[in-house]
Image (tube, rainbow, N blue to C red):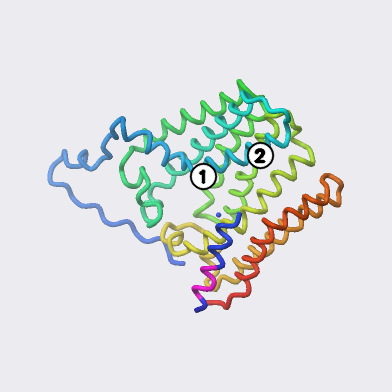
Amino acid sequence: GARPARLLCARRLSTSGLPSPLPPLPPSQPTAAAGAESALAPAAPGLLGLPSIYLELSKAKLSGLVVMTTGAGHLLAQLPLDPLLLGATLSGTFLCAASANTLNQVIEIPRDARMARTAKRPLPSGRISPAHALAFATTTGGAGVGTLLALTNPTTAALGAATIGLYAGVYTPLKPVTHYNTWVGAVVGAVPPLMGWTAAGGELLSPEAALLSGALFLWQIPHFLALAWMYRADYAAGGYEMLPRRDPTGERTAAVCLEYSCYLTALPFAVWASGLTGCMFAVESLAFNGVMLAAAAQFVLAPPN
């Protein structure tokens, strides 16, 4: 009864609003002829199959959520809307997110192959070659930053390039090293609303920008720690240093989820007290933040495994 209780609470957190040593690779099998190795290489995907593979590499659903946060930042900064500017901002952001996600998968091929939830991705399953995926990442990254530079402004383009660099160059390498990778990933995830804000003419260093990115940063910590708890065995199989890997009872993970849920719930009231928004912002936020706070509290109160 204790294990299902924690799992249920983690599921609620993961939908509110994201150990064992690394197992050895299986020994390679000797080939019967020199040409046999080439037969094991990934087959070139057909033209009709490429779009779906590209969408998988892009993590299209996740990138779509990123675009939604970008659009929210844009809407808060500009009224009336400029449809062309909004379209350029959203499309450039999506391309940058697609590039970052693809580079992440290129780097993590061996680890993804060890995890049940990622083994069927295009790269570990052999449906596309690493070179092809790298070319796709380079193309989408260049197109995304170029679109933002040409049609929005240099600040937004720099933020787009930074998300690619931080996600693929800092967050991804940290995942097998330290559980603080979650916090680094949350920093990256807090940048897209800033891109929408600056693309619409908002100041990067402003209270409004800090509120946009801060709220999203705080939301991500309990979300992704709950996912890490739910899939802790799979993450351990891949060799990732997530917080639940060193927290077999879940008590520490639950406590951190509750801590950041409290921060997120308090943020709108602090903003109201500062005079940046009206009281209704704080009141209305309870409908969303209250759900996460209740789920985090249940996670903490659930008996340990």
Give the image location of residue 303, x and y in percent.
Answer: 57, 78
Horizontally, residue 267 falls left or right of residue 112, namely right
Q: Earlier in the sequence, mark 2 or mark 1?
A: 1
Q: Which quadrant holds residue 294? A: bottom right
Question: Mark 1: which secondary structure?
Answer: helix
Q: Toward the viewer: 13 or 157?
A: 13
Secondary structure that dominates the magenta span = helix
Q: Toward the viewer: 34 or 150?
A: 150
**The label number, if any, that marks residue 72 in the structure image:** 2
Give the image location of residue 32, x and y in percent.
Answer: 13, 46
Q: Which residues are magenta?
A: 3-8
154 vs 262: above or below: above
**The label number, if any, that marks residue 87 in the structure image:** none
Residue shown at 63% from the left, 63% from the top:
257
Q: Provide the residue designation for mark 1.
A: 62
Residue 212 falls inside the magenta stretch = no
Horizontally, residue 28 falls left or right of residue 70, namely left
Q: Which quadrant holds residue 222? A: bottom right
Q: Residues within 10 Å of mark 2 (few under 14, many from 20)?
A: some
Residue type marked 2: Ala
Give the image location of residue 275, x and y in percent.
Answer: 86, 46
Q: Toward the viewer: 50 or 172?
A: 50
Residue type marked 1: Leu
**Given the current orientation, which residue lies at the most extreme top position?**
150
291 vs 187: above or below: below
Residue shown at 69% from the left, 57% from the top:
287
Give the image location of residue 35, x and y in percent.
Answer: 16, 38
Question: Mark 2: which secondary structure?
Answer: helix
